[in-house]
Image (cartoon, grey):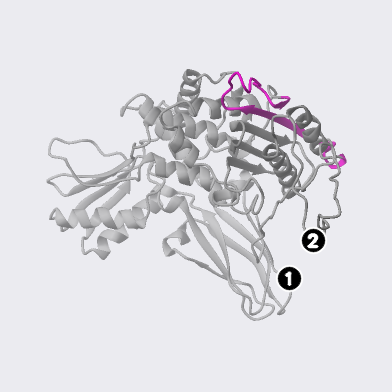
Amino acid sequence: MLLNTQLLSWQEAARANNPAVSPNPSINSKQVSQAEKPQSPALVCPAQLGNAIDAVTNRPEFSRTRWGILIEPLSTNSKFPERTLYSREPDRYFIPASNTKLLTTAAVLNKLGSQFRIRTSVYGTNGGELRVVGRGDPSFSDTQIRGLVQQLKRQGIRQVQQLIVEDDYFQGQAVNPSWEWGDLQAPYAAPVNSLILNQNATVLTLSPRSPGQPLQTAWIDPIAIAQWRLENNTVTAEAKSPAAIAVSAVLGKPVLQIKGQLPAGAEPASLGVAVLDPAQYFLQHFRRALVIAGIPIAQSQVGSGRERGDERELAVVESPPLETLLMETNQNSNNLYAEALLRTLGATSKGEETTLSENSAAMGLAAVKQALTELGVDPNSYVMADGSGLSRHNLVSPKALVQTLEAIAQTKEAAIYRASLPVAGVSGTLKSRFQNTPAQGIVQAKTGTMSGTVSLAGYMNHPEYQTIVFSILANQSDQSAPTIRQAMDEIVLLLTRLRRC
């Protein structure tokens, strides 16, 4: 993980004209020069679209890049009978990166409904035992813990003999075994369990000292100190020196190796770090909240309590509705949210009763397959290994993504699903793309990026075709992500110029 001292943003505006489809404009004596008033981009006829897109994807810099593209109108009629506007290897498998979330969220929304909420409960007994039962709410934070504790105080709880936090609603591994080891210390690869707190991530701050001294390290959350052992191989450099920090985990050990430098006098640098043992992290936070509220605890543990006859639900917190959770999942491409929702779908697909032999993620993947098949998506057009797209074992065709977008658009939850997607030039992961272009505000699409892989799929509001559905995937590329994104944006901008002619 490399840290840049300033945020980089990409302004990926496409070219105004494409010579493959745009004739040279004629200018008469009454027209101002192009230098004074740029010409509007020429319109693109359907017959020209293929050559125009090929002119982008067949550039020399993409000679080693695999492209998969499918572009279709959402609906057809007698006036516009075209079913496919453009296709390039639409049935071939590609690594989709975060475009996987389109499949996950479509299935979860279809099965659970937009108003579904995830419940976190505290049960109590007459003997002073408290049992906290988490069900994988990805939005759960310290604020919700304080809310539960205040409810307990109002219920008359003044001391606790035994505090048990249950972390077994989700069964199976908290970290997908096909994720790469190099990602696991990062917050975007945080473990996914039943007792999620603050997205199972925390922040490590590095501050410069005097030149030649190691950087000072500090956890923003003191409880996180027990999660990782730091090997600090950093140094404070002379003022105005370049800043460069690299962080890596040691295979099989709770050790973070930090290397690099910050210049003297520079602002502190903050690094997001995954929590290794989220259940213990949750327990320690809950204990602290009880103590602060004046409720002492005799014993506490992570474990499995047993329902007892004198037990009752003393406190409860519910997540925001699913439509809100989907916004965070897709707008900000939140991996933990996607994985928690996948496991929630798995845990609820067979009711509340799950056994130790069941794997919630695997059950969730099976439920996604079933839901999408019922919607009309070809079950052989994709292979899912996780719910977020972080795994390189995911294989998805452009056809699968377009079929999913088309299928969910025919359901009663269509508007909610579409609203969860980033809007070009406006929100989420597309906020910095398509600004001041014809695509701004009319494209809602999901992005995806990992090394060698870039993807974009979604909807475009179109003046003639009403809605266009598209999937663009680039794999096995030696080009930088911004270079590939610019090419994808050019393809999308070609669609804004598409007219019947």
Residue holding disc 1? 242
Determine the residue positioned at 75% across, 43% down: 487
For the residue pair 240 and 10, the one nearer the viewer reads as: 10
Decide which of tag 1 and tag 2 comes sooner along the chain.
2
312 displayed left or right of 423: left
User: What residue sits 59% from the left and 35% below the top?
Assistant: 178
Tell whether label 2 touches label 1 (CB within 8 Å).
no
Q: Is residue 218 depicted above or below 129 in this figure? A: below
Q: Residue furthest front?
A: 30
Q: Secondary structure at mark 2?
A: loop
Region in magenta: 60-89
Taking the spot 62% from the left edge, 41% from the top edge, the residue there is 448
> Is the N terminus in the top left, top right, bottom left or bottom right quadrant?
bottom right
Dot 2: few (<14), some (14–19), or many (≥20) neighbours within 10 Å?
few
Quadrant in which residue 241 is drawn: bottom right
Q: Amino acid at mark 1?
A: Pro
Count of numbered labels shown in the rendering? 2
Left or right: 461 with respect to 140? right
- Which corner quadrant of the image does residue 394 belong to? top right
Amino acid carrying mark 2 in the image: Glu
Task: Residue under label 2, please give it.
Answer: 36
Where's the C terminus, which quadrant?
Answer: top right
Front residue of 32 and 1: 32
**Secondary structure beneath label 1:** loop
Does 423 sit left or right of 277 as displayed? right
- Where residue 341 sits in the image (x, y, percent)? 44, 37
- How far apart marks 1 and 2 lie (CA) works out to 41 Å
Looking at the image, is 235 positioned above or below residue 136? below
